[in-house]
Amino acid sequence: MILPEIPQNEQERLEALRSHQILDTLSEDEFDELTELAAQI
């Protein structure tokens, strides 16, 4: 498996995700159902 390169702005990207509190959150059934549907399509 070829691993993707780490973006040059990785720290800024992670800080933005943390500021929105969307990393390391609990599972959300509605979101999980939506992503499962999108994967099937």
Image: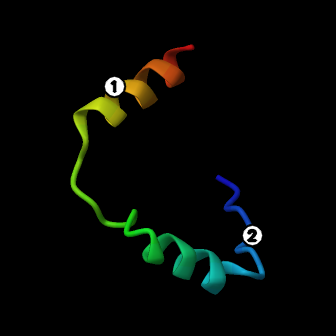
How packed mark 2 is, by other alpha carbons closer than 10 Å (few <14, some 14-19, many 20 or more), is few
- Real-space Cα distance between discs 2 and 1? 29 Å
Above or below 39: residue 17: below
Location of mark 1 (residue): 33
Q: Secondary structure at mark 1?
A: helix
Of tags 2 and 1, the one toward the viewer is: 1
Which x, y percent locates residue 16?
A: 56, 75
* Number of on-image labels: 2
Which x, y percent locates residue 21?
A: 37, 69
Location of mark 2 (residue): 5
Q: Report the residue at 50% width, 16% height from top.
A: 40
How packed mark 1 is, by other alpha carbons closer than 10 Å (few <14, some 14-19, many 20 or more), is few
Amino acid at circle 1: Glu
Above or below 10: residue 28: above
Q: Secondary structure at mark 2?
A: loop
Does label 2 or label 1 sit earlier along the sequence? 2
Above or below 18: residue 30: above
| Image quadrant in which you'd find residue 11 | bottom right
Circle number at residue 41: none
Q: Report the residue at 64% width, 83% height from top.
A: 12
